[in-house]
Amino acid sequence: MGLDPGLRRLALGTLLAAYPGAVPPQWAVDLVADGLAGHTLFGTNVHDPAQVAASTAALRAGRSDVLIAIDEEGGDVTRLAHATGSPYPGNAALGAVGDVALTRRVYQSIGAELAALGVTVNLAPTVDVNTADDNPVIGTRSFGADPLRVAAHSAAAVGGLQAAGVAACAKHFPGHGATVTDSHHELPTVDVPLELLRQRDLPPFAAVVAAGTQAVMTAHIRVPALTGDGPATFSRAVLVDLLRGEYGFTGTVITDALEMKGAAVAAGGVGPAAVRALSAGADLLCIGAQVDAALVERVAAEIVEATTDGRLPLARVEEAAGRAAALAAWTRAAGRSSATPDPDLGYAAARRAVRVEGLLTGLDQPLVVQLHTESTMAEGRVPWGLGPHLDGGREIRVVASETDQAAVRELAGDRPIVLVGRHLHRLPGGPELVDALAAAHPVTVVEMGWPGAWRPSAARAFVTTYGASHANGRAAAEALGLAG
């Protein structure tokens, strides 16, 4: 016996699905017509602007107010520019520049680009305060380590996106910046008193609520003082008592992807995770990237079953679907603004973020050595580094822990070496290779990740870009005098 059509439609109205490939399959459009709240676009759904615009138009044929979301943070997390790297610097670079008006303009430009393609919700900005230098998943996605600075830039980012007619979704509540594990792979714990959270992690969320953000995304992190043994995504104390009660948020609460280990393992699967998130006060459930019609139907069925067996009040599902519908209504009312994309602004901003310690001299035709760094699931495999921007010279790519520094020196000969890396302070073998080379050869280091406190002992210069986007790479090459 099939699901009650009305209950199925209600359950679908709380779900943000996804689909494979460059063209929405018929099932993805049919589910939208049946009441599915919307879809999230990932890099696999993006080939070129015309194709993306055609995809969003196809989804709107299913229902005109469908929510079409994307993770377009600029910097290291980009879907539109996943093949080349973003023309915008990310939050760490904007925080380093310290110009909130610039941050608003950059996000308005990103929003204008999304709006022109038919995307209605940006799962950004990241407003976490990155207080852990070894944070493996936030890092350069954060505006910085100072709560007040992060708060100011977060509000500006929300204002810029929404001025372009794209709903902002500030993430990851109540703050993912102090973690040293990645919630894509496990459930991180932030074991601190609530008062410390209020002082350190929560000010940016207060700022974006005051700025009118349309949505807030939950974090799959455990904060024992609030959440007990489970993640914040499943905690009514976090989503209702704190976010809505204390901070006065009235918009849509969107979950981080429920397929992530930080949620799915804790709940026993995506379907049970959906029920627990709704019960805790979430409104729009992001299923994840690996989605097909069968998975959407299973999750919807789990929600319907929970409403009929008493685990989940029907009124709670109706409230959640209503908030998702209100978000869709806002995106329709916002319409198209007069804002236009300005990617040149991104390159100018990236130049302003570059910081140089030491002297950039004697860099004629260097050997550029890029140290391999694994990408996070949030970033995906996006090109980075100086390679696309070099005018002459030679570039090699190596794994730090497997590289013989003597062989690199021999390859360089009498030329200087420029070492390029991300998060060098925590890269296995990275600091040791850099120090060994710098002790015997002219070395300049370019740090394109979160810089941390480590500095090489004998390098001639240490250059920090606060990100590895295409714009950051060009800015670094220009600062070194190597750009073509």
Image (cartoon, rainbow, N blue to C red):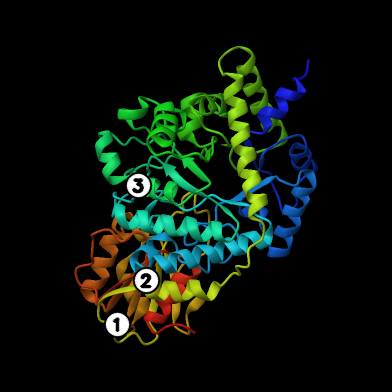
Q: Position of residue 420 (x, y in %)?
A: 38, 69
Q: Mark 3 vs mark 1: which is more N-terminal? A: 3
Asked which secondary structure carries label 2, the reply is helix
What residue is disc 1 on?
360
Q: Amino acid at mark 1?
A: Leu
- At horizontal 44% and vertical 62% (from top left) the residue drawn is 90
The answer to whether any part of residue 290 appears in the image is: no
Using residue 216 as the reference point, say whether residue 49 is left or right of it. right
Mark 3 touches mark 2? (CB < 8 Å): no
| Whether residue 188 is situated above or below residue 403 in the rendered picture | above
What residue is disc 3 on?
177
Give how far apart the Cα atoms at labels 3 and 1 are.
33 Å
Viewer-nearest of discs 3 and 1: 3
Q: Position of residue 84 (x, y in %)?
A: 57, 67
Where, quadrant-wise, is the N terminus in this rendering? top right
Q: Position of residue 363 (x, y in %)?
A: 34, 84
Q: Amino acid at mark 2?
A: Ala
What residue is disc 2 on?
353
The answer to whether any part of residue 264 appears in the image is: yes
Residue 241 figure quarter: top left
Q: Residues within 10 Å of mark 1 (few under 14, many from 20)?
A: some
Give how far apart the Cα atoms at labels 2 and 1 are.
16 Å
- Quick one: 330 or 25, which is closer to the camera? 330
